[in-house]
Image (cartoon, helix red, strand yellow):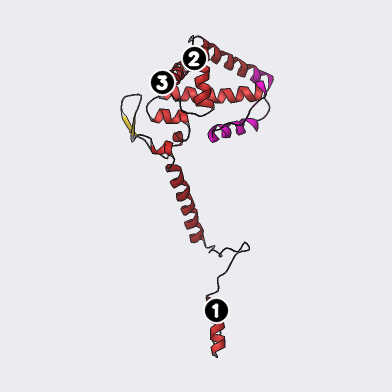
Amino acid sequence: MAFAKTSNQLARMRAAVNLVHREANGRHKRSSTKADLESRRKESEDQIMAVALAQPHRRSLPKTRIRDDGRRQDVDPRDPLASFALGRLFLHSTLSRDQLEAGQKYTSLFLRHGFHIVGVLPRFPSAAINDVASGISCAAEMSYEEAVALKRSWNEAQTALADTCEWQACSSALMHVCVLDREPGDDAVLGSLRVALNALSNLWNDRRSRR
């Protein structure tokens, strides 16, 4: 271990100890120990979650929701369902579990039909929907039998919506909320959305019960 023998050597040693180490980009060099890295990762996660929880649509969530069985359940603002309009309607007890699942299934069916059958899959305003769309676009090409089954599922869904005698209003509401990820906006759109989701839920539940 070296010792300073003169005042100049002592000054140089002090300067070396107090030297601010910098990275190539000019920023202060940060410690790379495992504990420090874990601490910075935790700080980053906390910052991201703080930003997410400060979003208006998460702040407006109720403290509890009424389940389909009538019981109350706590609502966590970190719930992934709070990140899209259909999920928030469920958390507000506006939609039932069956309606939520029907909406999610219809969204997937809409995207798969658009990509594999129509051949068009534009970018959507919702990050959640775009994630699903990206996964579909990366999927392997469909076989003829799979394409026929997909066409049949799409046609059956459209027939179920047409049987409500409100096909245009129902399709518009599904596009507005499920695909474009927008809030209903008024009671008319919300009512049409419920009619559409009930029709689709009944269709798929009946098909499941016949298996």
Q: Which residues are magenta?
A: 118-147
Count residues near mark 2 (Cα–Cα under 10 Å), then give few for <14, some for 14-19, many for 20+: some
Disc 2 designates what residue? 203
The three-letter amino acid code for the residue at tag 3 is Asp
Label 3, secondary structure: give it. Answer: helix
Indicate yes or no whether the magenta region holds residue 101.
Answer: no
Disc 1 designates what residue? 15
Point out which mark residue 102 bears. none
Q: CA distance from mark 1 to mark 2?
A: 77 Å
Whole-percent x, y for residue 182 in the image: 49, 29
Label 1, secondary structure: give it. Answer: helix
Where is 92 relative to 22, above or below? above
Q: CA distance from mark 2 to mark 3?
A: 24 Å
Residue 181 in the figure: left or right of residue 137: left
Which residue occupies 66% across, 21% down?
118
Sequence-wise, the earlier of marks 3 and 1 is 1
Q: Is residue 114 visible?
A: yes
Whole-percent x, y for residue 69 in the image: 33, 24
Indicate yes or no whether the magenta region holds residue 133.
Answer: yes
Count residues near mark 1 (Cα–Cα under 10 Å), then give few for <14, some for 14-19, many for 20+: few
Which residue occupies 44% across, 40% down?
55
Tell me the mark number nearer the camera, choosing from 1 and 2: 1
- Seen from the viewer's position, the closer of residues 203 and 59 is 59
Sequence-wise, the earlier of marks 2 and 3 is 3
The three-letter amino acid code for the residue at tag 1 is Ala
